[in-house]
Amino acid sequence: MLGPIRGQNPLDTKKSSSYTPPRVKRRRLINAVNPLQPPAEGEELVMLNFLPKILLGMISSLLLALNVIFWCAIVFIFALLKLALPFKPIRVILDHILHGIAANWISCNSGWMRLTQKTRWDVQGLDGLTYRGWYLVNSNHQSWVDIFVLQRLLNRKIPFLKFLIKQELIYVPVIGLAWWALEFPFMRRHSVEYLAKHPEMRGKDLETMRKACAKFSRIPTSIMNFPEGTRFTKAKHDRQGSPYQFLLKPRAGGLALSLSTMGEKFQSLLDVTIVYPDGVPGFWDFLCGRVKRIMVRMQQRPVPKKFIGSDYENDPECRESFQRWLSELWEEKDSRIGQLYVEARSARQVNAVT
């Protein structure tokens, strides 16, 4: 039997800094073999991140593109079947199949993310979620990366996420048609000046949302809302005169209509807060693996029953009440973001000292 390492106290049970417990080694080996397996909180899979960032970005872009082409081809086949067989029982079956395909698509996205990125995930609030139910997901919005973050964390934990998309994005090659095939609602954002000249367009977005919600009620679905309506930037914040430090003013229409038309189906309101403590990444930064840390906090809230079936469009009292409720929710989220930045700063200081 080998004795203690020279210079090591045989009574000291603390392992050296280079020691890796067998259990951790086994877990890393499993993760290396199966990169689609979600990691434990804070755990990293280090595989390709030793490459130069520009090369890593090119590899990530290639894997993303191949993943899109492969799964979109399958989505289109079943979408065409839905068009050819417009019978409700068959459409419900095909909807389940399409959601399953989309879940596999997201799993593969998570796979290449884990192969190419060395990101520390600080996530709380995933406990208690169920795949069999409807969720209304509400989140702040800073970057295109937000969508990948939400999909990676919530895939197969809640039903497939569907979110509102700007009408112009339907023309994005391949992926735009995939969003259409998966029945994502496409919305037009009209300015006040445009609506003044074209009053007939007023309420069209809400009508689109109403039709989409009717389709969503067929099978369990999660509706994703970014109430800010656009990604946060300092310029937009200043232009709005936003009363919040880290958020733009929330737009209530989509959220209110979702609650009005489907409120009785929602399992809960899943309130999500996303923070990038080292700076909000651009999409290319994300592909290059430059996102060092992502902090996410999720909280399940009861669906406010007073807004179920309400008439947000035509009832001024309801509209005022809803906007007040959303403003309070936004004030709490703004405070939470500030706290997360403080936590991240404290952690960096501790790491610097140690």
Image (cartoon, rainbow, N blue to C red):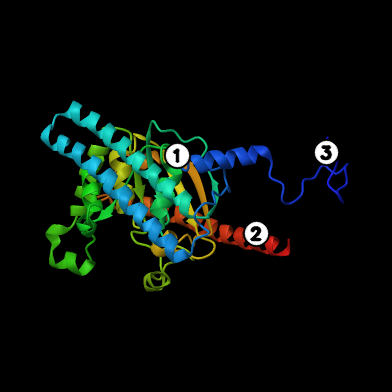
At 19% from the left and 31% from the top, the residue drawn is 91
Label 2 amino acid? Ala
Label 1 and label 3: CA atoms lie apart by 60 Å
Pick whichever, 239 or 75, lies toward us: 75
Q: Nearer the viewer, residue 343 or 43?
A: 43
Q: Amino acid at mark 1?
A: Pro
Task: Look at the numbered discs 1 and 3 and tell me whether their residues touch, using CB distance below 8 Å.
Answer: no
Along the polypeptide, which appears first: circle 1 or circle 3? 3
Sort mark 2 into few (<14), some (14-19) or many (20+) by Cα contacts within 10 Å.
few
Image spot of residue 318 (x, y percent): 32, 49
Secondary element type, mark 1:
loop
- Report the residue that reaches farthest toward the front: 1
Q: Which residue is mark 3?
A: 2
On the picture, is 67 further left or further right than 276?
A: left
Q: Is residue 105 visible?
A: yes
- Residue found 77% across the figure and 49% down from its top: 16
Q: Position of residue 337 (x, y in %)?
A: 52, 58
